[in-house]
Image (cartoon, grey):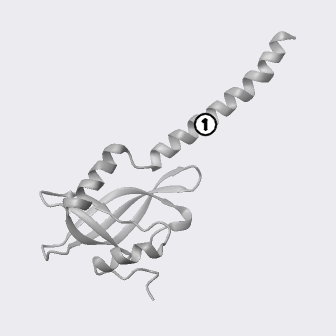
Amino acid sequence: MGSEVIWVVLIPVATIGFIILMRRVGKNMVSTSPADQEKIDRLTTSGERARATLTAIVPTGLTVNNFNVQCEVHFWIEPLSGAAPFEASKKMFFLETQFPRQGDTWPAWFDRTDPSTFAVGAPGKLDPAQIPLYREFGIEHPLDD
């Protein structure tokens, strides 16, 4: 009888522990790491500004927490300085309900010495507070009047 009590307690505790662990792993997969956040902060403060137009969005087949879809996103990046535009790509996660479309244009920042290092201002949930940033980059925001 003592071992039955242990199993009755152990199985739910182990299950809850496993669920909590998997949620943390999933969150870490889709959230920005401290190193990536540092790179983004550096690019947005001292990087070259550009407009990034989505030319292709290809799901990789990885989905986290049933609704965060990883995609290989290809961009046509046009520097605001008038420098030559270039192509670049990166893997990104998107909520199924906030999936971008080919042709969308977002603010972008890139490293002048290494243009393959870049960040984009993906809008995610549309917010009127994003409008001034889009206007600063000469991009029409979906919520513009």
| Residue at 29% across, 49% down | 38
Q: Quadrant of residue 118?
A: bottom left
Amino acid at pointer 1: Ile
Q: 28 or 74: which is nearer to us?
A: 28
| Residue at 77% across, 22% down | 9
The crowd level at tag 1 (other Cα within 10 Å; few <14, some 14-19, many 20+) is few
Q: 1 or 69: which is nearer to us?
A: 1
Q: Is residue 110 above or below residue 80?
A: above
**Element type where label 1 sits in the image:** helix
x, y percentage for residue 95? 52, 61
| Residue picked out by circle 1 | 20
x, y percentage for residue 76? 27, 71
x, y percentage for residue 145? 45, 89
Q: Could you tell whether 89 is left or right of 32 in the image?
A: left
x, y percentage for residue 140? 37, 83
Q: Quadrant of residue 93?
A: bottom left
